[in-house]
Image (cartoon, rainbow, N blue to C red):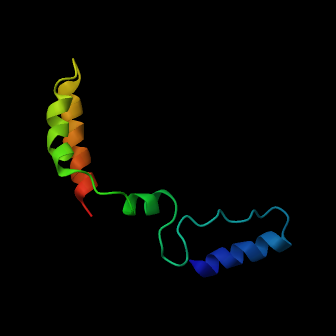
Amino acid sequence: MDLMHRAQEWLADRVSWVQYPKPRVRSLSGHAHGWKLRWQLRPKMNNALALCLPTAMLFVPRVGVYLAFLAVVFLFVYFKR
């Protein structure tokens, strides 16, 4: 893939109608940057808050059941490290 990227850059330098390739989405070093790094370095959530969050969502009128379900899904994603 790197060879294709460099070939497209070479063509873009020499042929007027060839556009430069889009910037790379992932870093070459393999280290996380931006939002991914912030998500990896997030502070640990209080366990008592994690236990009470879905139950507290049930007290929201009309949409509480849906919010409780989303809170459980969020907690599974949050504590998966």
- Quarter of the image for the N terminus: give it: bottom right
Give the residue at x 54% y 72%. 27
Q: Residue furthest top?
A: 61
Q: Judge from the rendering whether residue 43 lies leftward or rightward of residue 34; answer left or right.
A: left
Percent across and percent down for residue 33 are 51, 65
Location of residue 67 with respect to 12 vertically, above or below: above
Q: How many marks?
A: 0
| Front-most of residues 11 and 30 | 30
Q: Judge from the rendering whether residue 38 lies leftward or rightward of residue 58; answer left or right.
A: right
Q: Judge from the rendering whether residue 45 lies leftward or rightward of residue 52; answer left or right.
A: right
The image quadrant that residue 8 belongs to is: bottom right
Location of residue 76 with respect to 3 vertically, above or below: above
Give the residue at x 68% y 78%. 6
Location of residue 81 with respect to 59 vertically, above or below: below
Location of residue 56 with respect to 62 vertically, above or below: below
Percent across and percent down for residue 36 are 44, 60
